Image: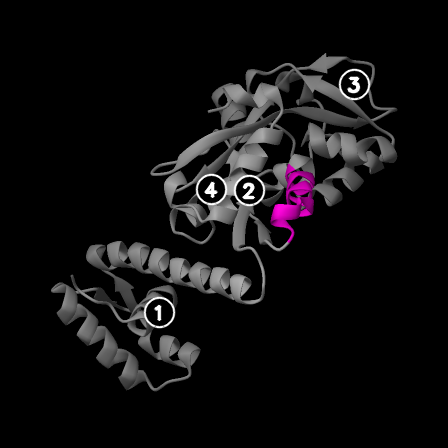
Amino acid sequence: MRSFDLTSLELFVSACETGSMVKAAQRAHIVTSAVSKRMSQLEARVGVPLFARKAHGMAPTDAGLALLEHARAVLNGVDRMDQDMQAYAAGGGGYVRILASGSPIVGPLVSDISTFLKSPGNKNVHVEMEECNSPGVIEGVRLGAASLGVCWDATSKVDLQTLPYYSEEVCLLVPQTHQLASRSEVKLTDLLAFPVVGGQPLYGTLQGLIDRLAAQAGLHLDQKIVVHSYEAALRVIASGLAIGIMPSSVAELTGAALGLKQIRLNEPWARRKYLICFRNKADLAPAAQRLLHHLQRNAPSEGASGA
């Protein structure tokens, strides 16, 4: 079995990310010749070139890209191992890192983690949570940056295992005085006459789906106002500048307080199912396995069809 030096792997990842051995050396606070020597040794060890020279810097070869994926997974695994051991050394009960898209965080996830940590057997577990879009959740879990992820089931989940978590509707939010406020439900075509707040960072995968469906139907939504958070979108809607498509958890939490009307979207894509994803259930640390079991146990019964 070949051994790989962790420092060399860290420098390799840095060189790939910066496209420069000089910048990788600056990031590591060492001389460039030391980075160059380690990269030469790494190439000699694997037996293939890992970098190709470009007009402005360097880029990983196909073999380099393959090693980059493995190196990130190894380094993330070592980082998680270190954090887990530190948690035990400090008298804790383990460490769990979880990635989640915005809707589950606004929805049931925070409450479920809170009840998990209040259980006597888990009070010393350290849980770290980070928000990112659904593709970012999948990539992070796949590369070992987190033990668990929670994301929309429409996202590709190659090489990961999944379990259902919960389901929710996306709805239309409008001011109480809006022309559509008297409607009990609407379709996507009903929105064409009105400005709709948009933003890829806000809606992530949902925004991409809406754009794709509109284009396929030959429709064009008026999205002149683009924001980057649910809070900003809610303020725009409350001001009357635009209407907006929102997860029901966001609408129920904040929409009513702003005087907004929640209207059902009569579209097949309006019901979203969320999954818990992980690389291999058998390989999860005990604390992560207990958290996974807790999330599954507390999942609403309708989520059982989301696998």
Q: Position of residue 117 (x, y in %)?
A: 65, 47
Compared with 132, 20 (above or below) is below
User: Which numbered mark, 4 or 2, is in the foreground of this view?
Assistant: 2
Tell me the kind of residue under disc 1. Answer: Glu
User: Which numbered mark, 3 or 1, is in the foreground of this view?
Assistant: 1
Q: What is the CA distance from the residue labelled 3 to the residue labelled 1?
A: 55 Å
Q: Position of residue 105 (x, y in %)?
A: 64, 41
Tell which circle, 4 or 1, labels the residue nearer the N-terminal end. 1
Q: What is the CA distance from the residue labelled 4 to the residue labelled 1?
A: 24 Å
Q: Which residues are magenta?
A: 109-123
Q: Are marks 3 and 2 in contact (CB under 8 Å)?
A: no
Q: Is residue 50 magenta?
A: no
Q: Dot 2 corresponds to which residue?
A: 291
Tell which circle, 3 or 4, labels the residue nearer the N-terminal end. 4
Which residue sits at x=21%, y=64%? 50
Q: What is the CA distance from the residue labelled 3 to the residue labelled 2?
A: 42 Å
Q: Which mark is residue 104?
A: none
Tell me the kind of residue under disc 2. Answer: Leu
Q: Which mark is residue 10?
A: 1
Q: Dot 4 corresponds to which residue?
A: 135
Circle 2 SS class: helix
Q: What is the CA distance from the residue labelled 4 to the residue labelled 2?
A: 22 Å
The foreground one among 177 and 49 is 49
Circle 4 SS class: helix
Q: What is the CA distance from the residue labelled 3 to the residue labelled 4?
A: 33 Å
Compared with 218, 122 (above or below) is below
Tell which circle, 4 or 2, labels the residue nearer the N-terminal end. 4
Q: Position of residue 106 (x, y in %)?
A: 68, 39
Tell which circle, 1 or 2, labels the residue nearer the N-terminal end. 1
Q: Is residue 146 visible?
A: yes
The foreground one among 8 and 265 is 8
Q: Which mark is residue 180?
A: 3
